[in-house]
Image (tube, rainbow, N blue to C red):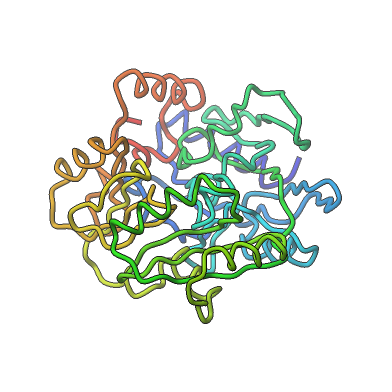
């Protein structure tokens, strides 16, 4: 057992005994996201490094404090990647923050989310106990998928110490085609194409243009381009990176940024300017109230998150009562004293 694990266990046990909240933090690149930042910082960056990587088995096991950029460079050297394209939002992004935030990039509807690529997770719970869920093989059935609960839990269920990922080969070909389109027509097109055997890896509408990203086998990409037409997008890699990392001019400024996950078929919404995930994700700059935006999202089968510059105490839309009851039971099981990332997911957790 590493010194970091022993020290973290001792600190968590002391915090539990005194009722002192702890704030789990890696590089701090996602400090803006979620509820209030409460408690003394428990820094994970000392717990860094790749533990095991077998490119032939498509499995990577890494410590949670490892920089995400280091992991991606290691995979790229073997022609592989994390298919869900996790956003960094800063040079200090770590693997633990990637999993805890549960955020995925533009490829998410076509390749899957963070939780879909988790094989196993090690963590220290709110009692200071070291736990392991899942494994290091794709067909592992141990743990009843408990490890996937850590994706998007914002550190409220434990301090993640190690993560095992399934990884995939990087696409051999990657091309983006652009079409002039209204938002309404773009939504219809994205939904129509989603049901066709096309190598889609991104579909976004912004500034009156529909951008379709095609990635995979070269022959499949060539055939898709011939079928769809459109104009090539110059420096497409930079464009998709700017969407993933929110460095595109659309995301600039201090106005509240809302993230609405809705049915892909939902019509253009009030204040809607950027449509991602093939219609399923809407980024809004809106002066509407929290209640109004959440009512709109619910009407279209989804939920609304105050992503940046909003009211932190109401960052995540509360789930239905039955689901919240499950959240409380999980929190009580993993962190009975409620000391880990208190209020980061919901104020009552």
Q: Is residue 87 above or below residue 339?
A: below
Look at 30% across and 24% down and name the residue there: 320
Image quarter (top left, top right, bottom left or bottom right) of the N terminus: top right
Q: Position of residue 325 (x, y in %)?
A: 36, 19
> Left of 146 or right of it: where is 17?
left
Q: Position of residue 77 (x, y in %)?
A: 78, 67
Look at 32% across and 38% down and name the residue there: 302
| Residue 172 found in image quarter | bottom right
Q: Is residue 24 above or below residue 252?
A: above
Q: Position of residue 349 (x, y in %)?
A: 36, 31
| Residue 337 found in image quarter | top left
Look at 47% across and 63% down and name the residue there: 244
> Left of 320 or right of it: where is 41?
right
- Depth check, front residue: 314 or 264: 264
> Left of 339 or right of it: where is 267?
left
Q: Is residue 70 above or below residue 10?
A: below
> Left of 329 or right of it: where is 84?
right
Q: Position of residue 43 (x, y in %)?
A: 54, 53
């Amino acid at each position: 057992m590493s010194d970091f694990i022993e020290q973290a266990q001792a600190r968590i046990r002391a915090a539990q005994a005194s009722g002192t909240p702890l704030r789990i933090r890696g590089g701090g690149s996602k400090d803006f996201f979620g509820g209030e930042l409460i408690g003394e910082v428990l820094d994970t960056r000392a717990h860094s490094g790749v533990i095991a990587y077998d490119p032939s088995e498509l499995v990577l096991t890494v410590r949670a404090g490892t920089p995400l950029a280091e992991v991606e460079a290691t995979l790229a050297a073997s022609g592989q990647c994390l298919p869900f394209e996790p956003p960094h939002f800063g040079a200090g992004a770590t693997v633990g923050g990637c999993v805890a935030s549960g955020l995925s990039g533009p490829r998410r509807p076509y390749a899957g989310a963070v939780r879909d690529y988790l094989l196993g997770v090690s963590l220290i719970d709110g009692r200071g106990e070291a736990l392991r869920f899942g494994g290091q093989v794709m067909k592992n059935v141990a743990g009843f998928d408990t490890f996937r609960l850590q994706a998007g839990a914002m550190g409220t269920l434990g301090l993640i110490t190690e993560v095992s990922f399934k990884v995939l080969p990087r696409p051999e070909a990657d091309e983006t085609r652009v079409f002039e389109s209204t938002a309404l027509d773009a939504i219809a097109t994205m939904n129509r194409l989603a049901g066709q055997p096309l190598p889609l890896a991104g579909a976004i509408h912004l500034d009156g243009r529909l951008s379709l990203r095609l990635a995979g086998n070269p022959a499949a990409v060539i055939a898709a381009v011939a079928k769809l037409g459109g104009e090539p997008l110059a420096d497409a890699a930079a464009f998709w990176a700017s969407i993933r990392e929110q460095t595109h001019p659309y995301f600039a400024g201090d106005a509240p940024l809302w993230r609405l996950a809705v049915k892909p078929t939902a019509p253009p919404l009030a204040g809607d300017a950027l449509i991602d995930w093939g219609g399923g994700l809407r980024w809004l700059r809106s002066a509407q109230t929290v209640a109004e935006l959440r009512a709109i999202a619910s009407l279209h089968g989804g939920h609304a998150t105050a992503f940046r510059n909003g009211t932190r105490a109401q960052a995540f839309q509360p789930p239905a009562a039955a689901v919240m009851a499950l959240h409380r039971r999980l929190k009580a099981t993993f962190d009975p004293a409620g000391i880990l990332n208190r209020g980061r997911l919901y104020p009552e957790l």
